[in-house]
Amino acid sequence: MAGDGGGGGGGGRTKPNILVTGTPGTGKTTTCSLLADATHLRHINVGDLVREKGLHDGWDEEFDCHIINENLVCDELEDMMEEGGNIVDYHGCDFFPERWFDSVVVLQTDISILHDRLTSRGYMGPKLTNNIECEIFQVLLEEAKTSYSEDIVMALQSDSVEDISRNVATLTECVNNWRPVRSS
């Protein structure tokens, strides 16, 4: 975790901000909930925030989801992110300001496992195909690497309960070892 130079570096924050991203079905919300319990950081599920606060521009019939308004989402999160101590849970990452995050975690899942998870959620047609292709081509990992300093981007496998437990332990250690960068 970059309390030592990369990404946001902490600014005036006393706690880190972490972005957990990945294709739907990779275990973001489960990982974030467990990590929030372990670290006492605030879990912000962007999808829930969009629904609760109406931070969208309508409904996408083809993909069966809200069309989020990225500017409204960033405006809503700005003060919380400046405070620090947040775990942001969302399947996209390229629209958040780089300065917000000390670590960007991309969860990845084996394609056959991901397919089963998504079909059990009722994904089908273009929504299923699009998400599987995103995972095959590592779209979110590439998006993270081009949007943030590579030294703060971490890819973690998330195929099983054991993987999730290991990931939470790894991230908890990172949070516990994080130190803000002192401004000179």
Image: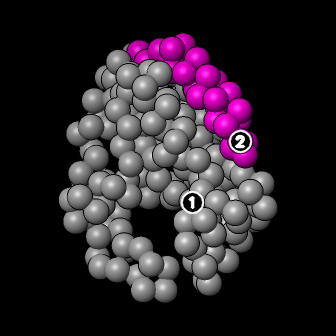
Count the marks.
Answer: 2
Instruction: Give the residue type at disc 1.
Output: Pro
The residue carrying mark 2 is 160
> Is any part of residue 173 visible from this angle?
yes
Residue 9 marker = none
Q: In the rendered view, does 169 fall on the left or right side of 9?
A: right
Q: In this orientation, which residue lies closer to the viewer: 74 or 157?
A: 157
Which residue is depicted at the point 51% across and 58% down? 92
Q: Circle 2 — which element?
A: loop
Decide which of tag 1 and tag 2 comes sooner along the chain. Answer: 1
Q: In the rendered view, does 57 fall on the left or right side of 15?
A: left
Which residue is depicted at the point 47% across and 53% down? 90
Which residue is depicted at the point 28% across and 29% down? 83
- Quarter of the image with the C terminus is top left
CA gap between label 1 and label 2 equals 15 Å
Instruction: Give the residue type at disc 2.
Output: Ser
> Is any part of residue 174 visible from this angle?
no
Name the spot of residue 87 as percent of width and height, x first.
43, 37
Name the spot of residue 167 as percent of width and height, x first.
64, 31
Please give the range of residues in magenta.
Answer: 156-182
Q: Circle 1 — which element?
A: loop
Q: Is residue 164 magenta?
A: yes
Name the spot of residue 108 as percent of width and height, x first.
69, 50
- Quarter of the image with the N terminus is top right
Quarter of the rendering containing residue 79: top left
Q: Is residue 157 magenta?
A: yes
Quarter of the rendering containing residue 61: bottom left
The residue carrying mark 1 is 24
**Magenta span main SS:** helix
Which mark's residue is nearer the viewer, 1 or 2? 2
